[in-house]
Each structure stands twice: as C-alpha cells, then as structure tokens.
Image (cartoon, rainbow, N blue to C red):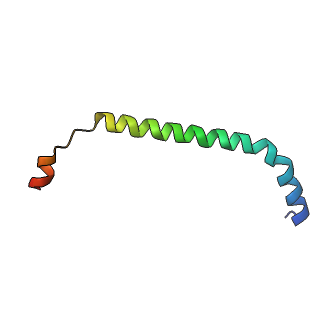
Amino acid sequence: MLSERAREQLEALFKPVLDPVIYWLDNLGNLITLTGKTLFWLVRPPYRISQFINA
C-alpha cells in the first residue's frame, strides 16, 4: 500500500500526462455516440401524427 504522500506525488506526476489523453478519449467517445445516434435516426421509420392520435 502507498502512503498518502506517495499517492499524491504519483498523482501529481501522472496528472499532466493523463489529462490530455482522457480529454481526447472523452471527446472521441462523444463523437462516436453522436454519430451512432445520427445513423440510428437516419434509418428510423417516420411516425405520422395520425398514428399517435389513433393510438
């Protein structure tokens, strides 16, 4: 187990390196999610208002 001070030192060492990578991966994930939702809605059948009224 690491002491609290050693943990803080490791965090201070890796934070500047990992923050840009995590930021980039988060943005990539958001882009992929948005693309997937867009493709899903692209092939989704249209729903007409009359179908909602008759239901």
Q: Nearer the viewer, residue 51 or 3?
A: 51
Q: Is residue 37 left or right of residue 20?
A: left
Q: Nearer the viewer, residue 49 or 41?
A: 49
Residue 46 at what x, y percent from top left? 21, 39
Q: Quadrant of residue 28?
A: top right
Q: Is residue 50 left or right of residue 18?
A: left
Residue located at (11% from left, 48% from top): 50
Quarter of the figure with the N terminus: bottom right
21 over 4 or under it: above or below: above
Residue located at (42% from left, 38% from top): 36
Q: Quadrant of residue 27?
A: top right
Q: Is residue 3 visible?
A: no
Residue located at (85% from left, 59% from top): 7
Quarter of the figure with the C terminus: bottom left
Q: Is residue 34 visible?
A: yes
Residue located at (16% from left, 43% from top): 48
Residue 18 at what x, y percent from top left? 75, 44
Residue 47 at what x, y percent from top left? 19, 43
Numbered-mark total: 0
Q: Is residue 54 left or right of residue 7?
A: left
Residue 45 at what x, y percent from top left? 22, 38
40 over 12 or under it: above or below: above
Q: Residue furthest left?
A: 54
